[in-house]
Amino acid sequence: MSWLAALAVVAAAGVSCWQYWRWTHRRMLELAAKVPGPPALPILGNALIFMRNPGDILNKIEELYNIYGEYFKFWLGPDLNICVKNPTDIRALLTSNKVNQKGPLYEVLIPFIGYGILSGGPSWRNHRKIATPTYNKKSVEHFTPIFNKEAEHIALVLSRKDPNVSFDAYKDIVKCTTQSVNQTLLGLSKEDSQNLYRLDELVSQTRSMYDLIFSKMTRWWLQIPIIYWLTGRKSLQNYYIQLLDDFSSDIVKRRRQALELSTPDEECMGIVDRFILSGQMSEQEIKWDTITLFTTSQEAAAKMASGVLLILAHLPEWQDKVYHEMMEIVGGHGPVNSEQLKQMQYLDMVYKETLRYFAIAALIQRTVEEEITINEGKLTLPAGTSLVLPIHHLHRDPRYWEDPYKVMPERFLPENVKKRDPNAFVPFSLGPMDCLGRVYATALIKTIVVWVLRYVHLEPVGTLDNIKLNAAISVSAADGYNIRTRPRAQKNGSIRTNGRINVVVRVLRYVHLEPVGTLDNIKLNADISVSAADGYNIQTRPMEQKNGSIRKNGRINGLS
Ligand code: HEM
C-alpha cells in the first residue's frame, strides 16, 4: 500500500512539474504550434527519430524537409528545435544580435573543451577577440613559407607511393596540416612540433572521440549519467579528456618557456602566446582553447584538402585544368604565394565545390535569445528555441544547385555564380560566430594542392557518386578519401623524379648543347665501369645567346 502511495505522489509531482513547465513555456508552445513538424511523444518528443548513425541523420533531416518544407520543428525532450533552410532567413538569423549563443547540443563538448571559442558561453566573445589577429590576412601571409615547406614534404611522400595501391589521402594530409598548424597558429618550433606529447595518439583518436561526442548528442538515453557510465562511455570520455589535457599542457608549457626568452613579433604571433600574454585567461581556459583551435584547424583543413584531391582524382579534365593553370601561374617549382593562389581560378572553383559537397559543419545550432520574426513576417521563433541551420542541406537544395548530388566545379564559373542566391553557399557560416579560420584554411589547402599536383598525377578509386558521409561533429567521407597517385615523371615521361627536377632538364634550361667531333665509334674505357675514353666533350652556349629569349641574370625567368 505504501508503495502505491509513493508512486501516486511521484506521479502527481511529475504531472505538476509538467503543468508548471507548460505554463512557464506557454508562449513558446503557442508559437511552436504554428510550425509544422512530426508528431511528438510526451517527454521524449521526437528524440527517437534521431536514433541512427551519423550519416543517416542527414538523410532523416532531408526527409523531414521534403515532408514539411523549409521550416519545420521537432522536440528533443523539452527542447524545441526549429530547422530553417531558407537562405535569406539563414543570413538574417546568423547575423542577428538576438541569436548570439550556441545551441544546447554544444553543451556535450564542455567536458572536453570547456566554454570558449567553439562551444560559446560567457567567455566566447573575449577569447575570440584575443585569437582573431592570428587568423587575419597579414598573419597568414607570414605563414606562407611554412605552408610551402610542409606541403612540399607531403607531396614528396605521395610521390613515393606505389601507383597501383590505393590509400586514404587524409592519413597523410593530416600530418601536413598538423605540422603546419603547430608551427603557425600554435607558434611552436619545428622541433617542438615534432615532439609534442601524445600528438600522434591524439590525431589518430580524433575520429573516435568525435563519434563518442556525437553519439551523446543524438542518443537521448546516453545523457543519463548512469547509462553513460554503464555502457563504458564515461571511462572512454575520461581517457580522451586526459589525452587532451596532456597534449595541451605540453604545448602551453613549451610556449611559456619560449616566452621567457623572447616575445614573437605581433604580426606573426601564435594564438597560445596571445592567450598567455593577454593575462585574461586561466591556465585551464588556455588549454581548452588551445585544443579547440588545434582540432578545428588541422582536422578541418586536412579533410577539405583531401576532399579536393579526391575530386581532382575523379575529374581528370579538372585536374588537367588546375595543373596547367598552376604551371602557368606558379611554375614547376619554388614556393607559391597568396597572390598566385588568388589568380588560380580553376583551383578556386574545385575548392568551392569541395566546400559545398563536403560542408564540414553539416548542421549548426544556435539559441534564440529574443523572439524574432522570419519568413517575411509569417513565422515568429520564440525565445529559447534551438535553431538548426542545415548547411549540408542548403548546399544540396535543387532550387539553387542543379543535380546537387553531382560534383561539378563549373557551378562556380562566374556566370553561374551570378545566377544563384549568394546566401545558398555558406561553408564557413556567417555572422559573429562564423569560422575564424577561413583565410588560413583556404591558403593552406590550396598550397597543399599546388604542391601535390606538381609531384603526382591523382587517380580515382571507385566512383564519386553518392559518397557516404560521416557527419559526427565535422563531416568527412565515411570510407576515407581513397585515391592512387602516380609520380608525374612516370605518367608523362617528363621531368620530376623523386621530387627533384632532373639534372638534364635543368642543364637544358640554361644552355644549348653543341657537339665536338662526331658520335661515331666513340672509344670506350672499360676498367671497373665503362666511360668515354676521351671524355664527354661538348660545347655549351647560354640560352639567351642562342635565341635571345628568357634568361636574365643567370635565372630562368619565373622558373628558377
Ligand atoms: C575549409 C575548412 C573549414 C571549414 C569549411 C570551416 C567551417 C566552419 C564553420 C561552418 C564554423 C561554424 C561552426 C558552428 O557554428 O558550429 C566554423 C567555426 C570555427 N572554425 Fe572553421 N572551418 C574550417 C577550417 C577551420 C580552420 C583551419 C580553423 C582554424 C584555423 C577554423 C577555426 C574555426 C573556429 C575557431 C570556429 C569557431 C568560431 C566561433 O564560434 O566563434 N576553421 N568553421
Image (cartoon, rainbow, N blue to C red):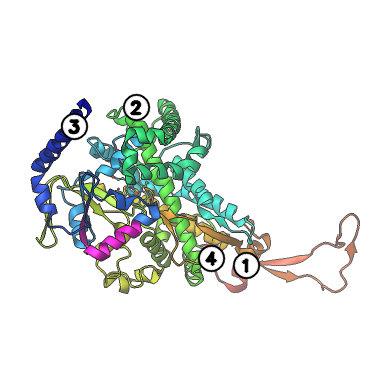
Tell me how far mark 3 sits from mark 4, CA to CA: 58 Å
Q: Residue furthest right?
A: 527
Q: Which mark is residue 491?
A: 1
Q: Amino acid at mark 4?
A: Gly
Magenta stretch holds residue 59: yes
Along the line of sight, the residue nearer the viewer: 460 or 214 = 214
Give the x, y percent position of residue 444.
Answer: 43, 52
User: Which mark lies nearer to you, 4 or 1?
Assistant: 4
Please state if 181 lies on the left or on the right of 1 as rendered: right
**Sequence-first disc among 4 and 1:** 4
Residue that numbered label 2 is attached to:
283
**Sequence-first disc among 3 and 4:** 3
Along the line of sight, the residue nearer the viewer: 124 or 513 = 124
Mark 2 near mark 4, Cβ–Cβ under 8 Å?
no
- For the image shown, how many numbered marks are present on the structure? 4
Q: Which mark is residue 462?
A: 4
Say if residue 391 shows up in the picture. Answer: yes
Mark 4 near mark 1, Cβ–Cβ under 8 Å?
no
Dot 4 lies on which element?
Answer: loop
**Sequence-first disc among 2 and 3:** 3
Mark 2 near mark 3, Cβ–Cβ under 8 Å?
no
Residue 509 lies, with reference to residue 274, above or below; the image says below
Q: Which mark is residue 10?
A: 3
Q: Badge 2: how crowded within 10 Å, few (<14), some, or many (20+)?
A: few
Quadrant of the image occupied by residue 109: top left
Which residue is depicted at the point 72% across and 71% down?
514
Q: Amino acid at mark 1?
A: Lys
Say if residue 193 shows up in the picture. Answer: no
**Sequence-first disc among 1 and 2:** 2
User: Which mark lies nearer to you, 3 or 4?
Assistant: 3
